[in-house]
Image: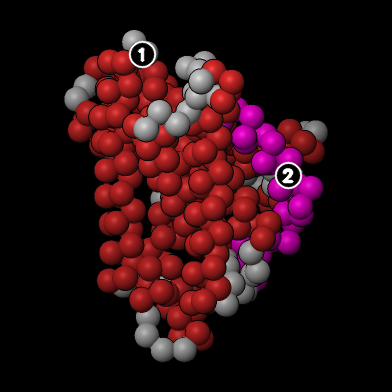
Amino acid sequence: MNAFLLAVRSSFGFLSTIPVGITMEGLDEFFKRTYLHMLVGIVIGLMIGLVSYVLASALSFQLTAVLTIVFIYYLTGLNHLDGIADIGDGMTAHGSLEKKVKALKDMSLGIGGVAFASLIILSLYSSLLSLLDEASATSADTGVSIALIVLLSMFVAEISAKQSMLTVAAFGKSIHEGLGSILVENTTLPKYLAGFVLGIVPCALAFYYLDMALVGIFAFLASIIATFILMNVSKRHFGGVNGDVIGSSNEIGRIISLIVITLALKYDLGGLPWTL
Protein backbone atom coordinates (compact mmCIF):
# COMPACT_ATOMS: atom_id res chain seq x y z
CA MET A 1 0.00 0.00 0.00
CA ASN A 2 1.16 3.52 -0.72
CA ALA A 3 2.91 4.92 2.37
CA PHE A 4 0.72 8.01 2.50
CA LEU A 5 -2.52 6.02 2.26
CA LEU A 6 -1.22 3.68 4.95
CA ALA A 7 -0.54 6.71 7.14
CA VAL A 8 -4.06 8.03 6.53
CA ARG A 9 -5.62 4.69 7.43
CA SER A 10 -3.48 4.39 10.54
CA SER A 11 -4.35 7.93 11.65
CA PHE A 12 -8.01 6.93 11.84
CA GLY A 13 -7.11 3.69 13.58
CA PHE A 14 -5.04 5.58 16.14
CA LEU A 15 -7.39 8.50 16.79
CA SER A 16 -10.80 6.85 16.50
CA THR A 17 -12.63 3.57 16.95
CA ILE A 18 -13.28 3.23 13.21
CA PRO A 19 -12.24 -0.38 12.41
CA VAL A 20 -9.71 0.33 9.68
CA GLY A 21 -6.94 -1.87 11.10
CA ILE A 22 -3.63 -0.65 12.46
CA THR A 23 -0.06 -1.97 12.35
CA MET A 24 3.28 -0.79 13.67
CA GLU A 25 4.33 -0.05 10.09
CA GLY A 26 1.20 2.06 9.69
CA LEU A 27 1.86 3.91 12.95
CA ASP A 28 5.40 4.67 11.80
CA GLU A 29 4.03 6.20 8.61
CA PHE A 30 1.44 8.19 10.55
CA PHE A 31 4.02 9.51 13.00
CA LYS A 32 6.03 10.78 10.02
CA ARG A 33 2.97 12.81 9.01
CA THR A 34 1.50 14.04 12.27
CA TYR A 35 -0.36 16.81 10.44
CA LEU A 36 -2.85 14.06 9.51
CA HIS A 37 -4.38 14.70 12.94
CA MET A 38 -6.27 17.48 11.17
CA LEU A 39 -7.64 15.22 8.45
CA VAL A 40 -9.03 12.93 11.15
CA GLY A 41 -10.47 15.97 12.92
CA ILE A 42 -12.23 17.10 9.75
CA VAL A 43 -13.78 13.71 9.01
CA ILE A 44 -14.74 12.88 12.60
CA GLY A 45 -15.98 16.43 13.15
CA LEU A 46 -18.27 16.10 10.15
CA MET A 47 -19.58 12.76 11.41
CA ILE A 48 -20.27 14.13 14.90
CA GLY A 49 -21.79 17.24 13.38
CA LEU A 50 -24.18 15.26 11.20
CA VAL A 51 -25.32 13.12 14.13
CA SER A 52 -25.83 16.19 16.31
CA TYR A 53 -27.78 17.78 13.41
CA VAL A 54 -30.22 14.88 13.38
CA LEU A 55 -30.50 14.86 17.17
CA ALA A 56 -31.06 18.61 17.42
CA SER A 57 -33.74 18.38 14.75
CA ALA A 58 -35.73 15.73 16.57
CA LEU A 59 -35.02 15.84 20.32
CA SER A 60 -34.89 18.18 23.29
CA PHE A 61 -31.71 20.09 24.04
CA GLN A 62 -30.93 17.86 27.03
CA LEU A 63 -31.25 14.61 25.07
CA THR A 64 -29.33 16.09 22.16
CA ALA A 65 -26.44 16.97 24.47
CA VAL A 66 -26.38 13.57 26.17
CA LEU A 67 -26.60 11.52 22.98
CA THR A 68 -24.03 13.71 21.23
CA ILE A 69 -21.59 12.99 24.07
CA VAL A 70 -22.34 9.28 23.79
CA PHE A 71 -21.59 9.38 20.07
CA ILE A 72 -18.40 11.40 20.57
CA TYR A 73 -16.93 8.76 22.86
CA TYR A 74 -18.31 5.91 20.78
CA LEU A 75 -16.45 7.32 17.78
CA THR A 76 -13.27 8.57 19.44
CA GLY A 77 -12.91 6.04 22.26
CA LEU A 78 -12.05 6.67 25.89
CA ASN A 79 -8.27 6.93 25.62
CA HIS A 80 -8.27 10.72 25.78
CA LEU A 81 -10.66 10.73 28.72
CA ASP A 82 -8.33 8.23 30.38
CA GLY A 83 -5.56 10.79 29.87
CA ILE A 84 -7.63 13.34 31.78
CA ALA A 85 -8.05 10.85 34.63
CA ASP A 86 -4.30 10.13 34.71
CA ILE A 87 -3.27 13.78 34.90
CA GLY A 88 -5.95 14.28 37.54
CA ASP A 89 -4.30 11.63 39.70
CA GLY A 90 -0.88 13.13 39.03
CA MET A 91 -1.79 16.74 39.69
CA THR A 92 -3.61 15.97 42.92
CA ALA A 93 -0.81 13.78 44.28
CA HIS A 94 1.12 15.37 47.13
CA GLY A 95 4.88 15.49 47.27
CA SER A 96 7.78 15.83 44.86
CA LEU A 97 7.71 15.95 41.09
CA GLU A 98 8.81 12.30 41.03
CA LYS A 99 5.81 11.27 43.15
CA LYS A 100 3.47 13.20 40.85
CA VAL A 101 4.92 11.51 37.77
CA LYS A 102 4.59 8.13 39.48
CA ALA A 103 0.90 8.84 40.18
CA LEU A 104 0.50 10.01 36.58
CA LYS A 105 1.84 6.70 35.25
CA ASP A 106 0.05 4.52 37.82
CA MET A 107 -2.54 2.26 36.17
CA SER A 108 -4.95 2.47 39.12
CA LEU A 109 -7.61 5.18 39.25
CA GLY A 110 -7.64 7.60 42.16
CA ILE A 111 -10.11 10.20 43.37
CA GLY A 112 -8.25 12.93 41.48
CA GLY A 113 -8.74 11.06 38.24
CA VAL A 114 -12.42 10.46 38.95
CA ALA A 115 -12.93 14.15 39.74
CA PHE A 116 -11.10 15.40 36.64
CA ALA A 117 -12.89 12.98 34.28
CA SER A 118 -16.26 13.83 35.82
CA LEU A 119 -15.63 17.55 35.49
CA ILE A 120 -14.69 17.14 31.83
CA ILE A 121 -17.90 15.25 31.03
CA LEU A 122 -19.97 17.75 33.01
CA SER A 123 -18.23 20.64 31.24
CA LEU A 124 -18.86 19.07 27.85
CA TYR A 125 -22.53 18.56 28.66
CA SER A 126 -22.88 22.12 29.96
CA SER A 127 -21.09 23.62 26.96
CA LEU A 128 -23.36 21.70 24.59
CA LEU A 129 -26.48 22.86 26.42
CA SER A 130 -25.25 26.45 26.36
CA LEU A 131 -24.48 26.16 22.66
CA LEU A 132 -27.96 24.82 21.94
CA ASP A 133 -29.55 27.66 23.92
CA GLU A 134 -27.51 30.27 22.08
CA ALA A 135 -28.11 28.57 18.74
CA SER A 136 -31.83 28.91 19.47
CA ALA A 137 -31.47 32.66 20.02
CA THR A 138 -29.31 33.03 16.92
CA SER A 139 -31.80 31.04 14.90
CA ALA A 140 -34.61 33.34 15.99
CA ASP A 141 -32.61 36.38 14.85
CA THR A 142 -31.19 35.03 11.58
CA GLY A 143 -33.52 32.27 10.47
CA VAL A 144 -30.67 29.75 10.36
CA SER A 145 -31.71 26.43 11.85
CA ILE A 146 -30.51 25.43 15.30
CA ALA A 147 -29.43 22.05 13.95
CA LEU A 148 -27.18 23.62 11.31
CA ILE A 149 -25.45 25.85 13.86
CA VAL A 150 -24.83 22.83 16.06
CA LEU A 151 -23.47 20.82 13.12
CA LEU A 152 -20.98 23.57 12.25
CA SER A 153 -20.01 24.00 15.89
CA MET A 154 -19.25 20.30 16.43
CA PHE A 155 -17.28 20.25 13.18
CA VAL A 156 -15.11 23.16 14.31
CA ALA A 157 -14.77 21.81 17.87
CA GLU A 158 -13.37 18.47 16.74
CA ILE A 159 -10.86 20.08 14.39
CA SER A 160 -9.81 22.39 17.22
CA ALA A 161 -9.42 19.39 19.55
CA LYS A 162 -7.00 17.74 17.13
CA GLN A 163 -5.06 20.98 16.74
CA SER A 164 -4.70 21.02 20.52
CA MET A 165 -3.06 17.58 20.38
CA LEU A 166 -0.76 18.72 17.61
CA THR A 167 0.19 21.79 19.66
CA VAL A 168 1.33 19.68 22.61
CA ALA A 169 3.27 17.41 20.26
CA ALA A 170 4.98 20.37 18.58
CA PHE A 171 5.89 22.45 21.63
CA GLY A 172 5.88 20.02 24.56
CA LYS A 173 8.89 18.36 26.19
CA SER A 174 8.57 14.62 26.77
CA ILE A 175 9.09 13.30 30.29
CA HIS A 176 9.42 9.62 29.34
CA GLU A 177 9.47 7.32 26.34
CA GLY A 178 6.23 6.11 24.78
CA LEU A 179 3.78 6.93 22.00
CA GLY A 180 3.57 10.48 23.30
CA SER A 181 7.31 11.00 23.02
CA ILE A 182 7.28 9.59 19.48
CA LEU A 183 4.64 12.15 18.52
CA VAL A 184 6.65 14.93 20.13
CA GLU A 185 9.84 13.89 18.35
CA ASN A 186 8.16 13.72 14.97
CA THR A 187 6.05 16.88 15.10
CA THR A 188 8.36 19.50 13.65
CA LEU A 189 7.41 23.14 13.13
CA PRO A 190 6.72 22.67 9.37
CA LYS A 191 4.38 19.75 10.16
CA TYR A 192 2.68 21.83 12.83
CA LEU A 193 2.18 24.74 10.44
CA ALA A 194 0.81 22.38 7.81
CA GLY A 195 -1.69 21.09 10.37
CA PHE A 196 -2.50 24.65 11.42
CA VAL A 197 -3.44 25.60 7.85
CA LEU A 198 -5.37 22.36 7.33
CA GLY A 199 -7.33 23.18 10.48
CA ILE A 200 -7.99 26.91 10.42
CA VAL A 201 -9.23 27.03 6.81
CA PRO A 202 -12.21 24.65 7.28
CA CYS A 203 -12.97 26.25 10.65
CA ALA A 204 -13.25 29.66 8.99
CA LEU A 205 -15.21 28.32 6.02
CA ALA A 206 -17.68 26.48 8.25
CA PHE A 207 -19.16 29.69 9.66
CA TYR A 208 -18.45 31.78 6.57
CA TYR A 209 -21.67 30.31 5.19
CA LEU A 210 -23.47 32.16 7.98
CA ASP A 211 -21.42 35.36 7.46
CA MET A 212 -19.68 34.61 10.77
CA ALA A 213 -16.28 33.35 9.62
CA LEU A 214 -14.53 34.72 12.72
CA VAL A 215 -16.51 32.39 14.97
CA GLY A 216 -14.60 29.36 13.66
CA ILE A 217 -11.28 31.20 13.77
CA PHE A 218 -11.80 32.37 17.35
CA ALA A 219 -12.70 28.84 18.47
CA PHE A 220 -9.69 27.32 16.73
CA LEU A 221 -7.22 29.82 18.18
CA ALA A 222 -8.76 29.64 21.66
CA SER A 223 -8.16 25.89 21.79
CA ILE A 224 -4.48 26.49 21.01
CA ILE A 225 -4.18 29.11 23.76
CA ALA A 226 -5.83 26.73 26.23
CA THR A 227 -3.33 24.06 25.21
CA PHE A 228 -0.37 26.27 26.03
CA ILE A 229 -1.89 26.87 29.47
CA LEU A 230 -2.28 23.11 29.91
CA MET A 231 1.36 22.57 28.92
CA ASN A 232 2.48 25.18 31.44
CA VAL A 233 0.50 23.48 34.21
CA SER A 234 1.86 20.09 33.16
CA LYS A 235 5.41 21.42 33.22
CA ARG A 236 4.95 22.68 36.79
CA HIS A 237 3.53 19.37 38.01
CA PHE A 238 5.45 16.83 35.90
CA GLY A 239 8.36 18.63 34.28
CA GLY A 240 6.92 18.22 30.78
CA VAL A 241 4.30 16.29 28.83
CA ASN A 242 3.45 12.72 27.89
CA GLY A 243 0.71 10.89 26.00
CA ASP A 244 -1.80 11.58 28.77
CA VAL A 245 -1.29 15.32 28.40
CA ILE A 246 -1.67 15.05 24.63
CA GLY A 247 -4.92 13.13 25.06
CA SER A 248 -6.15 15.58 27.69
CA SER A 249 -5.57 18.49 25.34
CA ASN A 250 -8.05 16.90 22.93
CA GLU A 251 -10.82 16.90 25.54
CA ILE A 252 -10.04 20.39 26.81
CA GLY A 253 -9.63 21.84 23.32
CA ARG A 254 -13.06 20.56 22.26
CA ILE A 255 -14.78 22.14 25.28
CA ILE A 256 -12.95 25.47 24.99
CA SER A 257 -13.88 25.63 21.32
CA LEU A 258 -17.57 25.07 22.09
CA ILE A 259 -17.52 27.71 24.84
CA VAL A 260 -15.91 30.28 22.55
CA ILE A 261 -18.40 29.55 19.76
CA THR A 262 -21.24 30.07 22.23
CA LEU A 263 -19.80 33.37 23.44
CA ALA A 264 -19.12 34.56 19.89
CA LEU A 265 -22.72 33.85 18.92
CA LYS A 266 -24.07 35.47 22.07
CA TYR A 267 -22.15 38.71 21.61
CA ASP A 268 -22.28 38.73 17.80
CA LEU A 269 -18.49 38.57 17.43
CA GLY A 270 -18.40 36.42 14.32
CA GLY A 271 -18.88 38.88 11.47
CA LEU A 272 -15.97 39.90 9.30
CA PRO A 273 -14.96 43.60 9.70
CA TRP A 274 -15.91 44.54 6.17
CA THR A 275 -19.47 43.28 6.68
CA LEU A 276 -20.13 45.59 9.64
Asked whether 32 or 259 is in front, the reply is: 259
Inspect this view and state whether residue 101 appears: yes
Lower sequence index among marks 2 and 1: 1
Left or right: 108 in relation to 136: right
Which of discs 2 and 1 lies nearer the camera? The answer is 1
What secondary structure is marked by label 2?
Answer: helix
Q: Which mark is residue 193?
A: 2
Looking at the figure, which quarter contains the N terminus?
Answer: top right
Q: Which span of residues is magenta-colored?
A: 177-203
**Which residue lies at the image location 34% right of the left edge and 67% below the top edge?**
113
Please rate how many residues cluster around mark 1, counting C-alpha atoms within 10 Å: few if below 14, some from 14 to 19, many from 20. few
Q: Main secondary structure of the magenta part?
A: helix
Residue placed most toward the observer, 167 or 80:
167
Q: CA distance from mark 2 to mark 1?
A: 35 Å
Kind of residue at disc 2: Leu
Q: Is residue 224 above or below residue 138?
A: below
Q: Can residue 48 be seen by looking at this rendering?
A: no
Q: Position of residue 115 (x, y in %)?
A: 28, 64
Count all numbered tags in the image, as a single digit.
2
Q: Is residue 33 left or right of residue 119?
A: right
- The disc labelled 1 sits on which kind of residue? Thr
Per the image, the residue denoted by label 1 is 142
Question: x, y (%) of residue 223?
Answer: 51, 47
- In the image, residue 182 lies in the stretch drawn in magenta: yes
Of residue 212 and residue 98, the one placed in the foreground of this image is: 212
